[in-house]
């Protein structure tokens, strides 16, 4: 007989997975940093197109969070201007938090449609109990790891997690951006 997973083991297991992915991203960047310097002018040109980058990030965050925010952090880190980096990181943080809240409401609205009911009956019904049990933890994992945040917020909305709890857990997204932003800014300099 299989033992049921506890909330804390679910949280720690998934946090560890997410942090391993982050470590892979940073390690790949550090290992490729000499090759990337060849394209420094092009990267800086991309980094100077703030409205375009923020627009791309906004679309990504609203549509399941496909592009990791670390990519944008790395673009701005390579310019080497800390004040600009912090301001841009603040924009990313606000966009991501707002997109998560929007995702919650999208999930909440979508869960009332007939299309969702068909998808739920066919594919998701078996996960309903787990989503309700681990919902807040799924949002926390999405908030602090490279797991797509918006998608976890949509799931939270679809199972009607309490909005107050959801908003409080989403604050960890701000902490995540601060810590990851510091790591993206600092770590490459440690290894050069």
Image (spheres, rainbow, N blue to C red):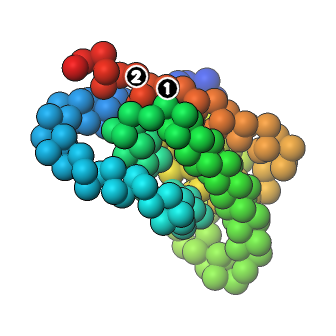
Which one is in front, 122 or 42?
Answer: 42
Residue 186: which numbered mark, if any?
Answer: 2
To which quarter of the image does residue 27 belong? top left
Above-or-below relation of 111 to 102: below
Drawn side of residue 164 relative to residue 73, left or right: right
Local secondary structure at mark 1: helix
Which one is in front, 116 or 48?
Answer: 48
Residue hosting label 1: 182
Residue under the image location 79 percent in, 56 percent down: 160
Q: Quadrant of the C terminus?
A: top left
Label 2, label 1: how far apart the Cα atoms are: 6 Å
Callout 1 environment at 10 Å: few (<14), some (14 to 19), or many (20+)? some
Drawn side of residue 70 relative to residue 64, left or right: left
Mark 2 and mark 1 residues within 8 Å of each other at the beta carbon: yes
Residue under the image location 54 percent in, 26 percent down: 179
Local secondary structure at mark 2: helix
């Amino acid at each position: 007989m299989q033992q049921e997973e506890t909330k804390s083991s679910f949280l720690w297991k998934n946090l560890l997975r997410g942090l391993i992915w982050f470590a892979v991203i940073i390690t790949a960047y550090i290992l490729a940093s000499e090759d990337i310097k060849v394209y420094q002018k092009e990267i800086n040109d991309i980094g100077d197109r703030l409205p375009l980058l923020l627009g791309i990030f906004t679309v990504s965050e609203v549509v399941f969070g496909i592009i990791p925010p670390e990519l944008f952090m790395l673009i701005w880190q390579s310019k080497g201007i800390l004040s600009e980096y912090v301001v841009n990181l603040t924009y990313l943080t606000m966009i991501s938090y707002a997109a998560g809240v929007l995702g919650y409401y999208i999930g909440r609205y979508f869960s009332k449609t007939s299309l969702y009911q068909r998808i739920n009956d066919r594919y998701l019904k078996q996960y309903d109990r787990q989503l309700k049990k681990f919902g807040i933890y799924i949002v926390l994992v999405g908030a602090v790891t490279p797991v797509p945040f918006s998608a976890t917020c949509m799931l939270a909305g679809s199972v009607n997690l309490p909005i107050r709890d959801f908003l409080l857990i989403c604050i960890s997204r701000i902490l995540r951006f601060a810590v990851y932003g510091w790591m993206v800014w600092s770590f490459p300099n440690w290894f050069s």
